[in-house]
Amino acid sequence: MILVLSPAKRLDYETQPVTAKFTEPRLLDQSAQLIGRLRELSPAEIASLMSLSDPLAALNHARYADWQPPFAPGNAKQAALAFAGDVYEGLDAATLPALGLDWLQAHVRILSGLYGVLRPLDLMQAYRLEMGTKLANARGKDLYAFWGGRISETLKADLRAAKAKVLVNLASEEYFKAVKPELLGVPVIQPVFEEWKGGRYKIVSFFAKRARGLMARYAAEQRLRDAAALQEFAAEGYAFAPEASDDTRWVFRRRQP
């Protein structure tokens, strides 16, 4: 199987990486085109486009100006160690053993507005560009138009290389909209994480994000080969709820966060 995650807005470039292993993003030529477009924007235009504060807009304006391949450990960091949001707190890749990191590299892909598809050990330079950003470009009005089928074709090649029979979607709706499931050639499993709140089960965004990372970590720790084994996931009180699930939508519930 291949699992896909969303990236994170929050980044950590201060902590030293726990591994010297790295790879290079495979769609950097496309990333360079987007950087060229972003460099045309002023800080005020970036603030308006991305609904950012003036300081954050200035920071990202500087990031676009500084972005420069080739990537190396001195100017970039492995994606799974650089992202630091809720998903990545659950994943906690820095504390996985070497074999766990190797499993992540082979079986996890991170969708990205700037880089398209990242492997966990792909080096990346700091950026802010959410997939839903309506950045007009030569291919259309937004990033979905820019990436077209490129993300799906990359995932399809990875699925074939891994001889994977299923793709497990642990990404957000915003990011998975960049994937065209009909091009993948395999079924898509959608795990859903629910909390008991107000007398019923519901999705709580913060907890759901963390749970996606926890599930990816569980798969890496166990070095799973069969997606069905994900139904045994039980971190932090979650349990598979077969009565609420079907063949492609797997619901995991807990009573108390």
Image (spheres, grey):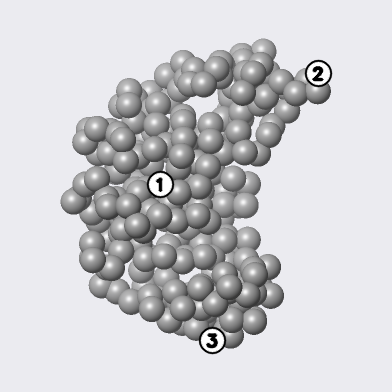
Q: Nearer the viewer, residue 191 or 234?
A: 234
Q: Which residue is farthest right?
A: 199
- The residue at the point 58 percent across, 73 percent down is 55
Please tell me whether mark 3 sits on a helix, a strand or a loop. loop
Which comes before the other along the chain, label 1 or label 2?
Answer: 1
Image coords of residue 61 (percent x, y): 51, 78
Q: Which mark is residue 199?
A: 2
Q: Nearer the viewer, residue 111 or 10?
A: 10
- The residue at the point 75 percent across, 23 percent down is 197
Q: Is 85 located above or below residue 149 in the figure?
A: above
Q: Which residue is farthest left?
A: 20
Q: Quadrant of the C terminus?
A: top right
Image coords of residue 154 (percent x, y): 39, 54
Which comes before the other along the chain, label 3 or label 2?
Answer: 3
Q: Quadrant of residue 172?
A: top right
Where is mark 3, residue-wise? 40
- The residue at the point 64 percent across, 18 percent down is 256
Cβ atoms at labels 1 and 2 below 8 Å apart: no
